Structure formats: structure tokens, C-alpha cells
Image: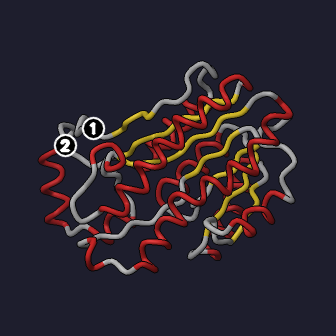
Amino acid sequence: MSKNALITGASKGIGKAIAEEFARNGYSLYLTGYSHGAELTAYCKELEAKYGIKAVPYICDIGNYNDVCDIFKNIQELDVLVNNAGIAWLGLLTDMTDEEWHRLMSTNLDSLFNTCKNAVPIMLKKHSGRIINITSVWGNVGASCEVAYSASKGAVNSFTRALAKELAPSNIAVNAIACGVIDTDMNRSHLSEEDIEALKEEIPANRLGSPEEVARLAYHISESPAYMTGQIITIDGGWY
């Protein structure tokens, strides 16, 4: 029997790489996206042709509870949930509007409630499952001019630890990956080449991480014993 994974924010970057890693390992996939629906649909077809698996795209607002409930009407079995969807906002907190704050929190944090509330009952039926949340080093230490993003990722870390304790008796592991600077479109849209070069000098590995490296880590976590739970695992080239 094929295993099944739901990966949010899978149109680009880290989510896209995670989707391919799980497809390569024989998983059937449910993939969500919001702003790049055509690309996500095409990518699902590409994964199906390349790996002989089933990949179903869902174009939705992952921060909207009703949208997520609609997705789960079509999911009967689920082994792995990867909460990857996220957006950033760079600037002074005093320049941020309340709409921008709520939009970021909806995508980065509310989405975890939406997916986990629906996924956990499915996993409880099998007495097994893996939930992996993609977070950031800024959730651990905070970042100037990224207050909202840092706050959302700090909350993801707490969510991860607390839900892990809640679900440990049911053999469902909940862990998070705290990413450093990963070479994605999102980061390149916020950082100049000068910024990127300056960051490389701060990072002991002297480079940005790749989405594929995060994807391999996510898959390894999904294969780890259920006794490894409640962990925030950092991948940042030795930066923090």
C-alpha cells in the first residue's frame, strides 16, 4: 500500500522540493498552493509521470479553515503532514498594517491549526503518523525588521512542542525544521545580492542552504522512530 503525504505550500521552493523527495520514495501526494495554481497543477502531472505516483493539487487559502476542511473531504488515509506554507514581511513593525499582520499569521500559524485539526483524527485511527512543521531560525532568536515573521515561527515552535506531548501516547510524532537562509524565490525577493553575499560570510558553511537539503531532512524525520518527537531541528550551515 502506498503511503500518503499532504504538503502545504508546494508550488515553489522548499515545499516543491519536499514534494519531489516524497514522490521519489513512493508517496502519493496531496499538494496545496495559493498564488501559483497553474504551476502546481503542472508539477503534479510531472511528478505522476516521473515517479508513477498519484499527486493531487489543491488551490486554496491554507489559512482559511473551510478551505482546508474541503481538502480533507477527499483524504481518507494520511501518513505524513508537512506544514510548509508560509509568507514573509520585511520592514519596521510600525510600518506594517493590521491586514498584513493578520494575513501573515493566517498563512504561517492558523494554517497549522487548520491542517492538524483535520489530520490528527485520521492518524489516530491508525495509531501512527508524522507531522513536520517548517519553521525558521528566526523563530528561535528573532530578527530585526521581521517581527511578525519571527513571532509566527516562534509560535510554530511552541505549537510543535505542545502538540508532540499531546500526541506522543498515540504514536504520532510532531517535529519541526528550523531553516536558516535557504536559496528560495521568497528569500531572493527580499534580499539583494549584496545582502546574500554578506550572509554567506556570516554562515560557517559559506553558502545558502538548498531546498533539496531541507527536503531530504524532512523525509528522514518522517522515517525516524516515533520516540523522536517535540524537536526543533535546525538546518542552517552552523549559523545559529
Q: Nearer the viewer, residue 45 or 127?
A: 127
Q: Residue 159 appears at what percent x and percent y? A: 53, 43
Report the residue marked by disc 2.
203
Residue 145 occupies which quadrant of the picture?
bottom left
Report the residue marked by disc 1.
237
- How far apart in space, not on screen, are marks 2 and 1 (Cα)? 6 Å
- Badge 1 element: loop
Quarter of the figure that contains the C terminus: top left
Q: Which amino acid does label 1 sit on?
A: Gly
Q: Nearer the viewer, residue 18 or 239?
A: 239
Q: Residue 7 appears at what percent x and percent y? A: 63, 52
Query: Which of the labelled discs sits on residue 196, or is there none?
Result: none
The answer to whether 125 is drawn above or below residue 142 in the figure is: above
Q: Residue 229 appears at what percent x and percent y? A: 56, 27
Q: What residue type is labelled 2?
A: Ile
Local packing at callout 2 (Cα closer than 10 Å; few below 14, some 14-19, many 20+) is some
- Badge 2 element: loop
Q: Describe residue 101's horizontal placement relative to residue 128 as left or right.
A: left
* Residue drawn at point x = 29 percent, y = 63 percent: 146
Quarter of the figure that contains the N terminus: top right
Local packing at callout 1 (Cα closer than 10 Å; few below 14, some 14-19, many 20+) is some
Q: Residue 227 appears at what percent x and percent y? A: 60, 18
The answer to whether 208 is drawn above or below residue 104 in the figure is: above
* Residue drawn at point x = 36 percent, y = 48 percent: 139
The answer to whether 56 is drawn above or below residue 52 in the figure is: below
* Residue drawn at point x = 66 percent, y = 35 percent: 130
* Residue drawn at point x = 33 percent, y = 43 percent: 140
Q: Are marks 2 and 1 in contact (CB under 8 Å)?
A: yes
Q: How many marks?
A: 2
